Image (spheres, rainbow, N blue to C red):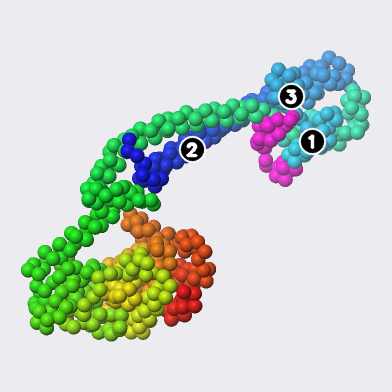
C-alpha cells in the first residue's frame, strides 16, 4: 500500500465516492425491502378483513333467513328471542368470542342511533358516517389508524336499513316487547328502509408486524452494508495496484521524479500539470517543424511566446530591417479547414484595421502571418498568479481592459473570447491583446455564425447566451470581463471546465455561481456585488455598458 499524500489524493476521493454510493445502495435496498414487506402485510390484512366481513354477513344472513323464521314458526307471533333472532346481537357476540381468541382483532357495528349504547359510534366512526353519507356510491373504506390503543388496519363498510329490520328498528310502538324491555325507547328506532343504519368495521393489528418489518429491513441494510465494506476493501486494493501506482510512476517520470501531489491536488492533477508542460514543448516543436528552416520570408522565427485560438505567436527578427519583431503565424491545421481559414483572415483584418494602445502594431501582413512589434512573453493568466496582482497594479490592468473593450464595442466589434490568456503583460503593468480569432464585427459577415459551427471558445469564460449559440451581443464581453475580475480577486476560476458535460452542463453551472467571498474571506461586499452583476445569468440584469462596469469597479478597487 502506498502512503496517502493528503486527504485529496485520487484514491481517497475514489473510495469516499464508492463508499457513499454503496451506502446509498444499501439504504435503497433496505428501503425497497421494507416497503415490499409492508405492501404484502397490507394486502394480507385486506384479504383477512374481507374474509371476516363476509363471515359476519353470512352469520347475519343465517340469522335472518334460518334462525329467525324457525323460531317464529314455533313460538307466539310476538315472541322475539334476541340471542337467536337479532342478527346484530348474534354477529357481535360471535365476533366478540373471535376477538378473545385472536387478540387485537375486533369487529364493531356502530350507529349514531343504536339500541345498545355499547354500539354508539366513536369519533372515528362518526367521521365514517359523514364520509359515506357524502357519497352514497361509496361502499368501502380502508386505512391504517389507531384503534383500541394500537395501530391497526381498518376496513369499514356501510350498513343500510333493510325492510326486514324495520320490525325492531322502525316504529317503537310496533317493536317487540323484549327489545323495548331490554333497551328502552331512547334509541335504535325511527329508521326507514334505505337509511344508513350503521357502519361495520374490522380492525386488524399491524403495529407488531410493522416493528418486525423494520427489524428485518435493518438487518438487510446491515448485511448489504457489510458486503459493501468488503467490496470497498477489494476496490481499494485493486484501484491502488491498477491505477494509483501507475499514475504516480508516469507523473514522476514526466516531472523528473519531483515529489507527489501538493495540498489540494490529486494524482491526476499532478499528471495534468506534467502533461501540460510536455504539451507546450510538443506544440512548440510542432510549430517549429512546420516552419523549417526557421525562416519565413525575411524573418527569422524564434521561440514561441504563446498560442492563440487560430495562430501561434513567435518571437522573431526582421533580417531585412534588422529589428526584433513578433510573428503571428496561422496554425497549419487551421489553414487546412476553409472555415477556420476564413476566421483567421477575419482576425488578421481586425488587427490590421483596429488601432489601440493595447493592440500590437502590425508592421506587415503576409499570407497567414502578421509581423508585429515585439511582444512580452508573460500572459495575463501568469500575471494573475503573481505578486503583482494586487492594489494599484490590478486596478491599472482592469482599467486598460475595460477601456479596450469599450473601444472595441465603439467600433462594432464583439470579442467573444475575453480571457486572461489572450492578453500579454508588459513590464507588469501594460496589457497587449494578441488574439481576436473569435471576434465578430458589425456589418461584416460572421463566419462562425453563418457556418453553424456552434459555441466557440473557452466554456469557463463564456456567457450563458453565448453557450446557447448567440453571437454579436456586447454583453457577452461584459460577462467575460466579469470572469477575469473574479479570477483576479479570487485567483481561481468560477467554473471548472469539464468537456464531458457539454454545453448543457456548462449552462447549469452558470446558474449556481459560487460567490467570490467563498474563496476570499472578508471580501468587500461592494466588489462582490459588482462581479456578480457583471456575471448575471440574465443579460438584462448585467451591466449594459462596459463603462458602467468600470465606473463601479474604480470605486471599490
319 and 539: which is toward the camera? 319
**Which secondary structure, mark 2?**
helix
Q: Which residues are magenta?
A: 129-156
The residue mark sitting in front, 3 or 2, is 2
At a point 66% along the width and 35% down the height, the residue shown is 144
Q: Which residue is mark 3?
A: 60
- Relative to 230, say whether 100 is above or below: above
At a point 35% along the width and 59% down the height, the residue shown is 497
Quarter the N terminus occupies: top left
Q: Which residue is mark 1?
A: 122
Is residue 214 found left or right of 334 in the rendered image? Answer: right
Q: Are marks 2 and 1 in contact (CB under 8 Å)?
A: no
Category of crowding for the residue at label 3, using alpha-carbon neighbours closer than 10 angstroms: few (below 14), some (14–19), many (at least 20): many
Q: Position of residue 398 (x, y in %)?
A: 39, 75
Q: Are marks 3 and 2 in contact (CB under 8 Å)?
A: no
Please indicate, yes or no, whether residue 463 appears anywhere in the rendered image.
no
**Which secondary structure, mark 3?**
helix
Amino acid at each position: 500500500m502506498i502512503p496517502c499524500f493528503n486527504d485529496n489524493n485520487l484514491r481517497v476521493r475514489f473510495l469516499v465516492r464508492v463508499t457513499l454510493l454503496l451506502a446509498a445502495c444499501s439504504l435503497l435496498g433496505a428501503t425497497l425491502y421494507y416497503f415490499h414487506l409492508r405492501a404484502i402485510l397490507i394486502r394480507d390484512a385486506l384479504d383477512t378483513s374481507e374474509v371476516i366481513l363476509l363471515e359476519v354477513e353470512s352469520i347475519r344472513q343465517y340469522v335472518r333467513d334460518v334462525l329467525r323464521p324457525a323460531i317464529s314458526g314455533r313460538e307466539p307471533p310476538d315472541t322475539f328471542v334476541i340471542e337467536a333472532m337479532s342478527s346484530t346481537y348474534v354477529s357481535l357476540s360471535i365476533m366478540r368470542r373471535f376477538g378473545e381468541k385472536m387478540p387485537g382483532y375486533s369487529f364493531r357495528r356502530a350507529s349514531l342511533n343504536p339500541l345498545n349504547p355499547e354500539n354508539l359510534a366513536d369519533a372515528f366512526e362518526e367521521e365514517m358516517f359523514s364520509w359515506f353519507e357524502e357519497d352514497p356510491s361509496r361502499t368501502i373504506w380502508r386505512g391504517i389508524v389507531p384503534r383500541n390503543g394500537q395501530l391497526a388496519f381498518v376496513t369499514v363498510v356501510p350498513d343500510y336499513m333493510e325492510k326486514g329490520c324495520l320490525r325492531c328498528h322502525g316504529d317503537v310502538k310496533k317493536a317487540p316487547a323484549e327489545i323495548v324491555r331490554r333497551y328502552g325507547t331512547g334509541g335504535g328506532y325511527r329508521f326507514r328502509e334505505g337509511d344508513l343504519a350503521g357502519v361495520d368495521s374490522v380492525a386488524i393489528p399491524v403495529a407488531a408486524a410493522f416493528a418486525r418489518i423494520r427489524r428485518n429491513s435493518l438487518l438487510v441494510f446491515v448485511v448489504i452494508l457489510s458486503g459493501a465494506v468488503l467490496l470497498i476493501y477489494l476496490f481499494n486494493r485493486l484501484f491502488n495496484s491498477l491505477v494509483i501506482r501507475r499514475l504516480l510512476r508516469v507523473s514522476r517520470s514526466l516531472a523528473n521524479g519531483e515529489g507527489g501531489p501538493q495540498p489540494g491536488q490529486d494524482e491526476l492533477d499532478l499528471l495534468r500539470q506534467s502533461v501540460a508542460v510536455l504539451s507546450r514543448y510538443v506544440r512548440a516543436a510542432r510549430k517549429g517543424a512546420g516552419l523549417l528552416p526557421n525562416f519565413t520570408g525575411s524573418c527569422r522565427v524564434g521561440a514561441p511566446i504563446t498560442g492563440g485560438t487560430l495562430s501561434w505567436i513567435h518571437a522573431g527578427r526582421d533580417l531585412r530591417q534588422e529589428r526584433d519583431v513578433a510573428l503571428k503565424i496561422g496554425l497549419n491545421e487551421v489553414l487546412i479547414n476553409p472555415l477556420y481559414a476564413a476566421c483567421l483572415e477575419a482576425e488578421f483584418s481586425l488587427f490590421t484595421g483596429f488601432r489601440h494602445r493595447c493592440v500590437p502594431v502590425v508592421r506587415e501582413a503576409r499570407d497567414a502571418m502578421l509581423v508585429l512589434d515585439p511582444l512580452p512573453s508573460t500572459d495575463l493568466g501568469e500575471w494573475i498568479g503573481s505578486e503583482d496582482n494586487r492594489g494599484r497594479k490590478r486596478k491599472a490592468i482592469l482599467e486598460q481592459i475595460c477601456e479596450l473593450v469599450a473601444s472595441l464595442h465603439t467600433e462594432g466589434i464583439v470579442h467573444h473570447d475575453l480571457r486572461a490568456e489572450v492578453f500579454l503583460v508588459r513590464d507588469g503593468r501594460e496589457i497587449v491583446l494578441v488574439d481576436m480569432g473569435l471576434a465578430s464585427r458589425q456589418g461584416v459577415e460572421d463566419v462562425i455564425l453563418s457556418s453553424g459551427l456552434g459555441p466557440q471558445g473557452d466554456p469557463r469564460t463564456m456567457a450563458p447566451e453565448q453557450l446557447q449559440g448567440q453571437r454579436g451581443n456586447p454583453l457577452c464581453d461584459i460577462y467575460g470581463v466579469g470572469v477575469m475580475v473574479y479570477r483576479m480577486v479570487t485567483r481561481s476560476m468560477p467554473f471548472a471546465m469539464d468537456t464531458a458535460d457539454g454545453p448543457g452542463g456548462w449552462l447549469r453551472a452558470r446558474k449556481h455561481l459560487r460567490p467570490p467571498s467563498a474563496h476570499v474571506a472578508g471580501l468587500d461586499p461592494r466588489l462582490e456585488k459588482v462581479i456578480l452583476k457583471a456575471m448575471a445569468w440574465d443579460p438584462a440584469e448585467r451591466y449594459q455598458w462596459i463603462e458602467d462596469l468600470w465606473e463601479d469597479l474604480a470605486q471599490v478597487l
